[in-house]
Amino acid sequence: MDAEKRDFKLHDGRSGAALTIRVTPRAIKDEISDIQEDGTIKIRLVATAPDENLNRALLKFLSGILDVRMGQLEIVVGDNGLDKLVTITGLDAREVQQRILKKIAAAEG
C-alpha cells in the first residue's frame, strides 16, 4: 500500500502523570493513609461503597491535594472497584509527587 495515499488521523496527546490508588471507604476522615513500596497510594475516604459517589469524593480529594481542577483528573481504570488508576493532566510525575509529599508533611506537622 502506498503510504502517501493512506488516510489517517493524528491526535494530540495530553501530558501528565498517573497515580495507582487503593481506596478504603467509610473512613473517619479523608486522608492519605500510606504510600506502599510499589508506589500505590492508599487513600481513606468518608464516602461509602465503590460507586460514583466514591469516585467523585476521590477526585475532589485529589483535586485539593494536588491543587488542580477536577477536570484535570480522570479515573481511567477501576471505576467500579477500590483499586484505581487516575491520570492528572498538566502536571508531570515529579510535580505530583512533590505536591503529595508536601501535603503529607503538612498533615503530620
Image: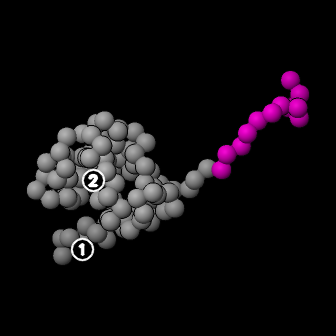
Is residue 69 at all visible to an observer of this figure? yes
- One can see residue 37 in this view: no
Q: CA distance from mark 1 to mark 2?
A: 21 Å
- Amino acid at dot 1: Ala
- When the figure is inspected, residue 6 is found, relative to residue 93, above or below; the finding is above
Residue under pointer 2: 57
Magenta span dominant secondary structure = loop
Residue 24 percent location from the top left of the image: 19, 46
Q: Position of residue 99 (x, y in %)?
A: 37, 68
Question: Is 39 on the left-hand or right-hand side of 3?
Answer: left
Assess whether residue 4 is covered by the magenta stretch: yes
Q: Amino acid at mark 2?
A: Ala
Foreground: 59 or 33? 59
Residue 30: quarter of image: bottom left
- How far across and down, in percent of the image, does residue 38 sit? 32, 46
Residue at image mark 1: 106
* Residue 33 falls left or right of residue 93: left
The crowding category of the residue bearing disc 1, from other C-alpha atoms within 10 Å (few below 14, some 14 to 19, many at least 20), is few
Viewer-side label of 1, 2:
2
Q: Is residue 2 magenta?
A: yes
Q: Residue at x 73, y 39 (%)?
A: 9
Which stretch did the figure color magenta? 1-12
Say what secondary structure mark 1 lies in.
Answer: helix
Quadrant into which the N terminus falls: top right
Front one among 88 and 59: 59
Q: Residue furthest left?
A: 28
Relative to 27, residue 106 above or below: below
